[in-house]
Amino acid sequence: MIQRNIIAIDLKSFFASCECVERGYDPFKVNLVVANPFQGNGAITLAVTPALKKLGVKGRSRLYEIPKNIRYEIVPPRMKLYLEKSKAVVNILLDYVDEKDIHVYSIDESFLDVTSYLKMYKMSDYELAEKIMQDIYNKLKLTTTCGIGPNILLAKVAMDIEAKHTLNNIAKWTYDDVKTKLWSISPLSKMWGIGPRMEKNLNKLGIYSIRDLANYDVYKLKDKYGIIGEELYYHANGIDESIISDYKVPAKSESYSNSQVLFKDYDRSNINLIIEETIEVVCRRLRKAKKKAKLIGLGISYSKTVGGGFYHNIKVHPTDLESDFLKYSLNMLDTYYKDEPIRKVSICAGNLTNNDSIQLNMFESIENIEQEEKLHSAVDEIKERFGKNAIYKASALLDDSTIIERNKKIGGHHE
């Protein structure tokens, strides 16, 4: 198994802490809520201070859900300020490790691979984490939590599950902690990489804890969920072979990508259609270039009122099939989506290879693949000759679809 020294760092109650720092408040003593005050009592709290959390107030709730006996100050969100603070934190991290050894996971979380730096600093990973956390506080007055592990997964889960309950906000997990700490996680959605929708799907299989998942038949999980099912099984056993570079967005010269900025809020009930239409564009480009992708990436950006989002990719057998892209993209969506309003979708096809062979896995049928390829080839030919709107799926007529209008704006017969 991979054995590295990974540090995961999270900025504690980030938005609310930034507002407190700007006002000279102590976020551990002041009751402050970041929310739009003009939306009334139904406004969503984007963040609350640790002082409010200690009183039982959740970070994402409605203002009317805060007990009436608790007094607090409401401040409007300032995304520009939070982005500036986030960049300042990353600059501090770059004082300790090279850019290639940092993955900025979100506006308030980052991963560092410090394996090759410990001898130089003459420190343990724990001591280095303490120094970095203290440096961030000294320079920016922002408090952090930290997880340390032999791989990215265990560092992240140690941070999420245990670090916030320790005196110094640090938790270190090793492979010896898998059965005693990782397996005890329940419900499943408390585990990084398992969203509420995936939790419900796994519950239907009789899987209610990480221990259940770790001891389930991996072949059944792969048969049902593909590569993500296999990944869930290995993660439940503390195994994560990914490295920091796997989380980097592929260079444009080695990938095809397409994005849609949306003009209204989408959610889990209607975003599938947008993802499918974005995939259609990417896969058409792949087929035209006679390429296949060995990496599929999904990016989701939330509304400005919420901020953030995610980008994840997954290694796959070489493919240019829309059905493959959709299956893996929706699995990633189920895994990482946090039920926030969506305003941008990105699909990336990376690690390209020439389309000169069909590579099967044990769950695929060559007949099905050939049938889908013939269908796409026919559709591509019609669009090439008569324009992109010459033929489209019935779903393009739905209110939430954007494909017809986008094709009109792009114009022309060719990509």
Image: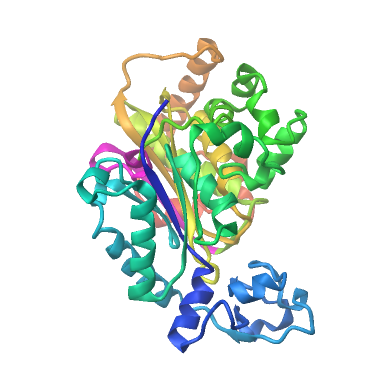
- Identified at 53% across, 54% down, the residue is 402
Q: Is residue 117 left or right of residue 145?
A: left
Q: Please, is residue 234 above or below residue 126 in the view?
A: above
Residue 213 image position (x, y, % from top left): 66, 29
Q: Please, is residue 76 above or below residue 307 in the view?
A: below
Q: Quadrant of residue 183?
A: top right
Q: Is residue 32 left or right of residue 389?
A: right
Q: Identify the residue at the far left of this view.
A: 120
Residue 265 image position (x, y, % from top left): 59, 63
Residue 208 image position (x, y, % from top left): 74, 36
Out of 96 and 309, give the one closest to the viewer. 96
Report the number of numbered marks: 0
Q: Is residue 92 left or right of residue 30?
A: left
Q: Is residue 351 left or right of residue 232?
A: left
Assess whether residue 251 is covered by the magenta stretch.
Answer: yes
On-image quarter of the C terminus: top left
